């Protein structure tokens, strides 16, 4: 039986710690961490993520400013809003939920965010600093995966970590994080993608296999080495008439098939997802503290 690694339990524990830290920040520096959450359009998954982020902020004392716009909101209006938020003293972090509608240039928007308020870690300054192993705002999902491994005593040093998926949000930054000459890292990392030849042959060499593809049940038992650790980043909605909301969430890994073969695995939901939110909170608190340090 594999160890099922819960992100939910760790999330609950971390929220307690963050709450105390925020109370201290307020007492010692008179600062209430502020996060602007920008959502354009009505993508149902984005709406649900944004709600979860705002709920977590409210629980621990982060002031979140909820900015929602119709899908025809213009790129110019969005850039103007970001400029205002960059100058707003009560806002320490700015999050623009992705994906944006097609008529908006995502890179242009992300580049407009002040790197010191970029709590998603998507600005090239932060991405570059991550590459160089320097302190910065690191993307929440990779940070969450690293924390899950550390807190569950799963060493990555010297291990072969295979990441399936090369997105700027998960695959690439996770590789950069785990390859660093630092505690909780020092891994040998391979990134696989749609053009990888014989994907199974590569994934079977993984001590730690990370699935971040965005396609249900892409990783099957035959692709996994006996005793490996499997991290499932996928959050895929599949129709399910037995559920009140009409769908259920499944991962990129075929859990039922893979679990008996591995030593540890994250579930979906309740694995990586809550850790993404936890690390966003971490980044917002860091932004507020960094702001206090600059005052
Ligand atoms: N869309 C999917 N994941 C993320 C994330 O971590 N941050 C933002 N802003 N958008 C996302």
Image (tube, helix red, strand yellow):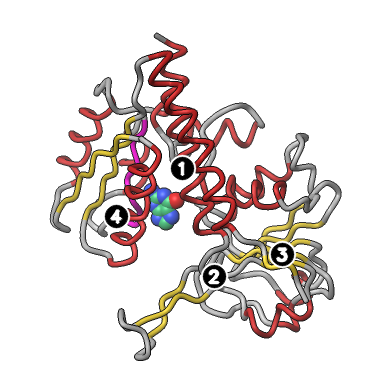
Q: Position of residue 177 (x, y in %)?
A: 66, 42
Image-quadrant location for residue 98: bottom left
**Mark 1 secondary-structure assignment:** helix
- Ligand 1 closer than 8 Å to the CB at disc 1? yes
- Name the residue beneath numbered marker 4: 100
- Name the residue beneath numbered marker 3: 209
Instruction: Name the residue rendered at 75%, 65% in the picture.
Output: 229
Count of numbered circles in the view: 4
Q: Position of residue 182 (x, y in %)?
A: 76, 34
Q: Determine whether label 2 and label 1 are within 8 Å by CB.
A: no
For this rendering, which residue is in front, 282 or 95?
A: 282
Q: Label 3: few (<14), some or many (≥20) within 10 Å?
A: many
Q: Point out the frontmost of discs 4 and 3.
A: 3
Q: Is 278 on the left-hand or right-hand side of 107?
A: right
Q: Where are the magenta residues, as a range?
A: 93-100
Instruction: Name the residue rendered at 84%, 75% in the picture.
Output: 226
Say the numbered circle drawn on residue 268.
2
Say the numbered circle drawn on residue 280.
1
């Amino acid at each position: 039986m594999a160890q099922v690694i819960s992100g939910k339990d760790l999330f609950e524990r971390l929220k307690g710690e963050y709450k105390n830290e925020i109370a201290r920040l307020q007492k010692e520096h008179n600062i209430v961490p502020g996060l602007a959450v920008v959502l354009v359009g009505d993508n149902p998954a984005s709406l649900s993520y944004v709600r979860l982020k705002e709920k977590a902020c409210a629980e621990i004392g982060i002031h979140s400013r909820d900015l929602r716009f119709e899908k025809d909101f213009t790129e110019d209006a969005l850039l103007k809003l970001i400029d205002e938020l960059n100058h707003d003293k009560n806002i320490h972090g700015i999050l623009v939920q992705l994906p944006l509608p097609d008529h908006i240039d995502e890179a242009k928007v992300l580049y407009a965010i002040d790197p010191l308020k970029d709590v998603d870690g998507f600005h090239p300054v932060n991405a570059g600093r991550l590459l160089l192993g320097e302190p910065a705002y690191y993307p929440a999902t990779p940070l969450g995966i690293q924390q899950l491994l550390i807190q569950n005593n799963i060493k990555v040093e010297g291990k072969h970590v295979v990441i399936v998926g090369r997105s700027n949000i998960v695959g690439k930054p996770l590789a950069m994080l785990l390859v660093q000459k630092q505690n909780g890292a020092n891994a040998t990392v391979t990134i696989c993608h749609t053009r990888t030849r014989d994907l199974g042959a590569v994934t079977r060499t993984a001590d730690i296999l990370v699935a971040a593809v965005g396609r249900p049940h892409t990783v099957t038992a035959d692709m996994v080495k006996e005793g490996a650790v499997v991290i499932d980043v996928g959050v895929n909605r599949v129709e399910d008439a037995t559920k009140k909301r009409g769908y259920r969430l499944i991962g990129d890994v075929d859990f039922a098939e893979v679990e008996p073969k591995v030593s540890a695995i994250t579930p979906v939901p309740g694995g990586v997802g809550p850790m993404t939110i936890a690390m966003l909170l971490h980044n917002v608190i860091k932004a507020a503290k960094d702001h206090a340090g600059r005052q």
